[in-house]
Image: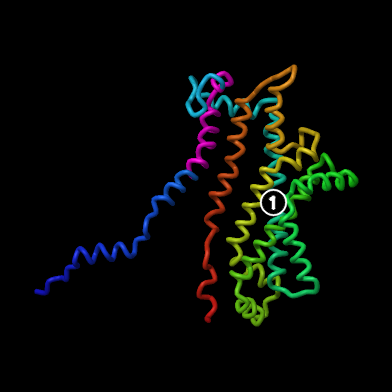
């Protein structure tokens, strides 16, 4: 009878220590601090959304009040002022779907074309894109307002949607990602098989670009969802306000002669406003896959 070989415990521990990544106490503490910094505002928002107007000022910020009024606050948020919050939510969804969706599409097409095709003025175009990335959006808000006022587009949804269609950073990100993730050999093979450029893009390239497209989509969705300054100067009709401007208007009701503070609704509305963003992130994160083209090209 042959006895099975036994592994020396010291050798086993040594092998385990080699394969297991080393721990860093300092790095762990830093990550805990970052996690604490990110979660405390969310915890504060949820806890205070469960309080009544009186409990907000009579209890500690990170402690629950005397009564759990979350569902009452949610109902009051959606019914206050003839349900204007639902209108603001619909406006925000409109700006995100059309503006951020269009920005993602345009950035994908332009970035892919810039990376895979040669045409006159390509270098100058790329320089303009890099320069646009360095310009903050707030610096362009006033010139954009003056331009749109001349065109008669202020106080309309187009004054928010059209500027949102331009995403220089998204274009640059797709350009970089295309160079790294879409092998030229795959495109040439598709062309040899008789595929047109459009068919090659939609059947080969776009599958490899999915992680980059999702990243650009998340950036543009969050930027459009949180856009505040541009709607503030472009819109004067509350019927076209997004959630950011509308909630700020509710918060401003606490000041003035005829003050009507509704801080509990402002906090609850802010809590409801972040739920779609969290849902979109959880849904899109499954598309973040790397190495889709690994092994497709023989070196």
Residue 24: x percent and y percent?
39, 54
Front-lying residue, 226 or 23: 23
Q: Front-most of 81 and 58? A: 58
Residue lying farthest to the left in this orientation: 1
User: Looking at the image, is 8 positioned above or below residue 55?
Assistant: below
Residue at the extreme front of the image, as rendered: 26
The answer to which image quadrant residue 104 occupies is bottom right
For the point 64% across and 23% down, the residue is 262
Q: Position of residue 117 (x, y in %)?
A: 72, 74
Magenta region, residue range: 35-56
In the rendering, at what x and y percent does residue 68 appear?
Answer: 50, 24
Judge left or right: residue 173 versus residue 258: left
Residue drawn where x is 74% and y is 61% of the image: 129
Mark 1 Cα-neighbour bin, 10 Å: few <14, some 14–19, many ≥20: many
* Element assignment for label 1: helix
Whether residue 43 is in magenta: the answer is yes
Q: What secondary structure is the stretch in magenta mostly built from?
A: helix
Q: Residue furthest right?
A: 150
The answer to whether 211 appears left or right of 131 in the picture is left
Viewer-side residue, 278 vs 133: 133
- Whether 114 is drawn above or below 231: the answer is below
Return the x and y of residue 205 as percentages of the image width and height: 63, 69
- Vertical order, 211 against 99 (above or below): below
| Residue 35 or residue 72, whichever sits in front | 35
Examine the structure image and report whether residue 285 is included in the region drawn in magenta. no
Give the colour scheme shown.
rainbow
Residue 272, picture quadrant: top right
Residue name at image x 63 percent, y 78 percent: 190
Q: Is residue 37 above or below residue 168?
A: above
Residue to which mark 1 is pinned: 100
């Amino acid at each position: 009878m042959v006895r099975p070989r036994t592994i020396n415990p010291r050798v086993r521990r040594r092998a385990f220590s080699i394969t297991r990544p080393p721990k860093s106490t300092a790095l762990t503490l830093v990550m805990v601090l970052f996690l604490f910094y990110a979660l405390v505002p969310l915890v504060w928002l949820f806890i205070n959304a469960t309080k009544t107007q009186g409990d907000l000022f009579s209890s500690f910020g990170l402690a629950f009040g005397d009564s759990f009024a979350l569902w009452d606050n949610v109902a009051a948020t959606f019914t206050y002022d003839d349900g204007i919050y639902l209108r603001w939510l619909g406006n925000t969804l409109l700006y995100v779907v059309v503006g951020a969706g269009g920005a993602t599409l345009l950035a994908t097409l332009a970035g892919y074309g810039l990376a895979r095709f040669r045409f006159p003025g390509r270098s100058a175009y790329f320089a303009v894109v890099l320069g646009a990335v360095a310009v903050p959006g707030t610096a362009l808000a006033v010139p954009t307002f003056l331009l749109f006022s001349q065109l008669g587009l202020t106080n309309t949804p187009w004054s928010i949607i059209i500027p949102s269609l331009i995403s220089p950073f998204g274009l640059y990100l797709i350009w970089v990602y295309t160079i790294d993730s879409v092998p030229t050999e795959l495109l040439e093979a598709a062309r040899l098989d008789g595929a047109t450029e459009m068919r090659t893009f939609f059947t080969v390239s776009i599958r490899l670009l999915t992680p980059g497209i999702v990243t650009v989509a998340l950036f543009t969705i969050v930027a459009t969802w949180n856009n505040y300054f541009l709607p503030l100067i472009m819109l004067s009709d509350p019927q076209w306000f997004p959630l950011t401007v509308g909630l700020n208007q509710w918060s401003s009701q606490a000041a003035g002669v005829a003050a009507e503070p509704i801080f509990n609704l402002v906090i609850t509305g802010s809590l409801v406003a972040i739920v779609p963003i969290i849902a979109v992130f959880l849904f899109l994160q499954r598309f973040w896959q790397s190495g889709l083209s690994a092994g497709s090209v023989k070196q």
